C-alpha cells in the first residue's frame, strides 16, 4: 500500500516553530538573530543588537548579555570595557524564533553615550529631540 | 599657511549622528532599519520588523506602522489583512540611527498567531513556555 509522503514538512515546521515548546532559533543568512534588551523593572527598551550562535550561548552560560559586533566581527560582551553589563533575567522568543527580548537589569547606562537607553531621542517632524533631560 | 584638512569627516559625522537633532536614518546594506513596536501604554514589546525608506515614509505619512516584508519583497502595512493595525504615537531613534522604537496603540493582537505580542514564549532551559495564559 502506498503512503502519501509530504513533499516538504514546511507547514509542520512552521506550526512547531510557532506553537511548540522546542527552542529552534532561526538565524538569518548572516547567522544572526535580532535581540532587544528591555529593562526588566521599568520596561524601557535599552538597546537593540544582534546575536550569533556564539553570543547566544555566551549569554545563556554567563547570564550576561553578549552580542555579535558586526563592525568588529567578533563576540562582544556588553560592558566589557565600561563595566556596564546587562544581567539577563529572562529571555522571550518571538513567533518565528528569529528575534529575542532579553529582560535585563543594567549595571549602568546601557548606551555607549552614557545615556540610560540608546533611545534618548524622539522624532518630531524632521528633528530629533532629547527626552532624557 | 597650510591647514590640516581632515581625511574624512568620520568623527564629526558620528558626533552629529549621535548627539545632533538631525534625523539621518542609517539604513543597512539591504536598505533596512530595525523597528521595534512597543505598546505605548503598558510598555510591552509587541513585534520587531524591518523598515526600508518607503515603509518609514508610509508610517510617518499615515500614522500607521508599515514595514518592509523581506519574504514578500514589498511594503507591508501591518494589519492590512487582519485589520490589526498599529497606531504610531511616537518614534524613538537610537544613538547611531539604525534602529527605531515605535510607541504604538494596537488595534488588535499584534501577532499573526493572534497573541497580543509576538513574544508569547519564555525560554526556560531548552524549552519554551507560553506566558500568555
Image: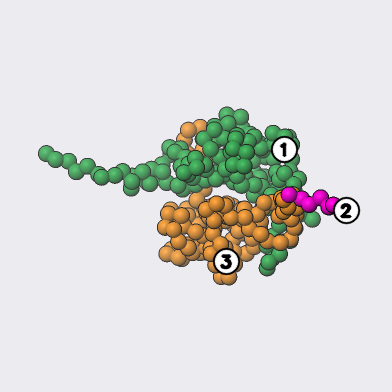
Chain colours: A green, B orange
Answer with the quarter of the image where residue A103 lies. Answer: top right
Image quadrant where one finds the C terminus of chain A:
bottom right
Q: Which residue is mark 3?
A: B57
Report the mark closest to the observer, 1 or 3.
3
Element class at badge 2: loop
Asked if residue A5 shows in the view, the reply is yes
Q: Main secondary structure of the magenta part?
A: loop
Q: Local crowd at mark 3 within 10 Å, few (<14), some, or many (≥20)? A: some
What's the residue at 63%, 36% (across, down)?
A: A76
What's the residue at 63%, 58% (across, down)?
A: B25
Report the mark closest to the observer, 2 or 1.
2
Q: Circles 2 and 3: CB distance less than 8 Å? A: no
2 or 3: tag closer to the N-terminus: 2
Element class at badge 3: helix
Q: Which chain is mark 3 on? A: B
3D distance between C-alphas at marks 1 and 3: 35 Å
What's the residue at 64%, 47% (across, down)?
A: A47
Q: Circles 2 and 1: CB distance less than 8 Å? A: no
Residue range highlighted in magenta: B2-7
Q: Which chain is mark 2 on? A: B
Provide residue A89's location: percent of width, then percent of height: 61, 37
Q: Which residue is mark 2?
A: B1
Q: Residue furthest right?
A: B1
Q: Is residue B61 left or right of residue A132?
A: left
Provide residue A16's location: percent of width, then percent of height: 38, 43
Badges 2 and 3, same chain: yes
Badges 1 and 3, same chain: no
Circle on res. A84: 1
Is A30 magenta? The answer is: no
Is B5 magenta? The answer is: yes
Amino acid at each position: 500500500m502506498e503512503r502519501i509522503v509530504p513533499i516538504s514538512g514546511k507547514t509542520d515546521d512552521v506550526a512547531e516553530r510557532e506553537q511548540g515548546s522546542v527552542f529552534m532559533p532561526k538565524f538569518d543568512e548572516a547567522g544572526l538573530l535580532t535581540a532587544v534588551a528591555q529593562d526588566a523593572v521599568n520596561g524601557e527598551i535599552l538597546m537593540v543588537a544582534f546575536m550569533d550562535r556564539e553570543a547566544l550561548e555566551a549569554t545563556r552560560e554567563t547570564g550576561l548579555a553578549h552580542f555579535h559586533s558586526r563592525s568588529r566581527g567578533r563576540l562582544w560582551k556588553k560592558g566589557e570595557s565600561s563595566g556596564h553589563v546587562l544581567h539577563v533575567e529572562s529571555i522571550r522568543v518571538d513567533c518565528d524564533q528569529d528575534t529575542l527580548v532579553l529582560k535585563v537589569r543594567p549595571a549602568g547606562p546601557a548606551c555607549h553615550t552614557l545615556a540610560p537607553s540608546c533611545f534618548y531621542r524622539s522624532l518630531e517632524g524632521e528633528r530629533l529631540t532629547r527626552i532624557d533631560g
